[in-house]
Amino acid sequence: MRIDLHTHSSRSDGTDNPQELVRRARAAAIDVVALTDHDTTAGWDEAQAAAGDGGITLVLGLEISCRFAATGVHLLAYEPDPSYPALDAELERVLAGRNARLPTTLHRLRGLNIDISVADVRAVSADAAATGRPHVADALVRLGAVRDRDEAFDRYLSPGRPAYVDRYGADLVTMIGLVRDAGGVSVVAHPWGRSSRRVLTEAAFEQLRDAGLAGIEVDHNDHSARDRAELAAIADELGLLRTGASDYHGVGKLGHPLGCNRTAPQQYEALRQRVREATRAAGSL
Ligand code: AMP
Ligand code: ZN
Ligand code: FE
Ligand code: FE
């Protein structure tokens, strides 16, 4: 069984539409794929329609932009009911924060003599529920200001670079509770990638587990072999599930092909069990 629990479509900042994503996963001999767009479930219906053709199991998820100890942390949420009002309201706030940031980003770029309009960014993000930095990067590529997304982040869009603008993120502990109350299961995405390493200590994971966290994404390309071994030990110690995934973004993120990291079948089965329990508990609230 090849199980990949973290992928993005063009409903956020991936480059395949949800149908293409499911088709490619099937072609890559993936048995179980989770669609986890940033802060939106907009791709779920199309992905489900494509998975209905058979040959693959689709897990409905999303990757939610959160905050913990003043640091950005991404939370993977599997199978929550997106119509649960408190979850829906919080996702709306996050998406609004994404869109609100864009004019400031573009203003900063104009200060660097790079002239991109909101319409230019919309032209490269027409399918997306909200804009992200990768879309600004694509507009910069289209203008010829940079070669690719990586160069756009390195020169302009990463924290500390001149066009970086912070935005709203949901409180992580609160969000873990909302996902659970909505009948879903949560897993911290790439905890030791980029910025969140400092704040996600073993003690922090213990606090998150007590708030309802189900697992840690251990196998991710942002983690070294040593990170993976240490995170796996923390997960085992705390009774958290261990997942692995590609964080595929189509051609938008190089070096993250579908299935490049995978979740072990027993871990996946345990995650399914947690979803069943959460769904049952939410139904009886
Ligand atoms: P945003 O959600 O708008 O803050 O943008 C974050 C997204 O940008 C994530 O999906 C990352 O995959 C992507 N990203 C972050 N850093 C880089 C980078 N250096 N090169 C390419 N993509 C990046
Ligand atoms: Zn992304
Ligand atoms: Fe992420
Ligand atoms: Fe991701």
Image: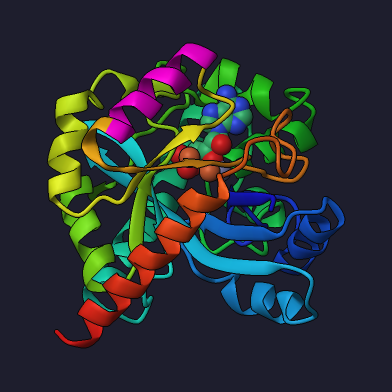
The quadrant where residue 153 appears: top right
Q: Residue at x 26, y 42 (%)?
A: 239
> Between residues 223 and 19, which one lies in front from this camera angle?
223
Expressed as whole percent of the image width and height from the top left, the position of residue 54 reads 78, 77
The quadrant where residue 145 appears: top right
- Majority secondary structure of magenta residues: helix
Inspect this view and state whether residue 133 appears.
no
Q: Residue at x 25, y 27 (%)?
A: 200
Up the image or down, 119 lies above or below 223; here it is below
Q: Is residue 150 left or right of residue 42?
A: right
Q: Confirm whether the magenta stretch covers residue 190.
A: no
Up the image or down, 136 lies above or below 71; here it is below
The quadrant where residue 94 appears: bottom left
Residue at the extreme right? 27
Expressed as whole percent of the image width and height from the top left, the position of residue 191 reads 38, 31
Expressed as whole percent of the image width and height from the top left, the position of residue 155 reads 58, 16
Residue at the extreme top? 226
Up the image or down, 10 lies above or below 51; here it is above
